[in-house]
Amino acid sequence: VQLVESGGGLVQAGGSLSLSCAASESIFSFNVMGWYRQPPGKERELVAALSRVGDIHYADSVKGRFTISRDGVINTLYLHLDSLKPEDTAMYYCAASYSTSDYTIRGMENSLWGQGTQVTVSS
């Protein structure tokens, strides 16, 4: 099973990007999927999570600016990033778990992770 992220890039502050995470099997086989990021020199952090039944959680820092969604037909998880800020610069990762509903970093540490896609926001 693989998760492959795409869509990162360089964007000016205030701009938008859309990230994709393509899964090699049905995304509904996962109990929870999420987007995480690791800014330069900092620890990895939760951005947004989406459960199988549709419950959504956002980190406070991205509420109202980022939107997590999915397409079960093409087995893809999305993250749309609006009103980007320089502090959003990070490597963004997709993760998925078959079992846990704990979408925190600790809860997902033994789950499936993608290779990441870089988002850089210039000021």
Image (cartoon, rainbow, N blue to C red):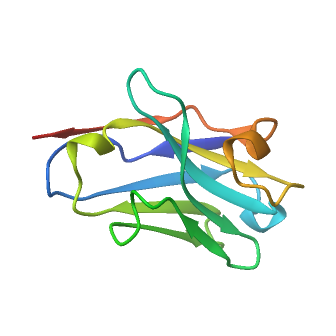
Query: What is the total number of numbered labels drawn onto the structure image?
Result: 0
Q: Residue at x 49, y 62 (%)?
A: 78
Q: Report the quarter where the N terminus lies.
A: top right
Residue 35 in percent (x, y) is at 55, 51
| Whether residue 1 is visible | no
Q: Nearer the viewer, residue 5 or 79?
A: 79
Q: Write down the quadrant of residue 86 in the picture.
A: top left
Q: Report the quarter where the C terminus lies.
A: top left
Residue projecting furthest to the front: 60
Residue projecting furthest to the right: 99
Judged left or right of residue 28, residue 119 is left
Residue 93 in percent (x, y) is at 54, 41
Q: Write down the quadrant of residue 65 in the picture.
A: bottom left
| Whether residue 62 is visible | yes
Q: Nearer the viewer, residue 7 or 85?
A: 85
Q: Residue at x 75, y 44 (%)?
A: 108
Residue 79 in percent (x, y) is at 45, 60
Judged left or right of residue 111, residue 81 is left
Residue 36 in percent (x, y) is at 54, 45
Q: Nearer the viewer, residue 71 or 102?
A: 102
Judged left or right of residue 44, residue 33 is right
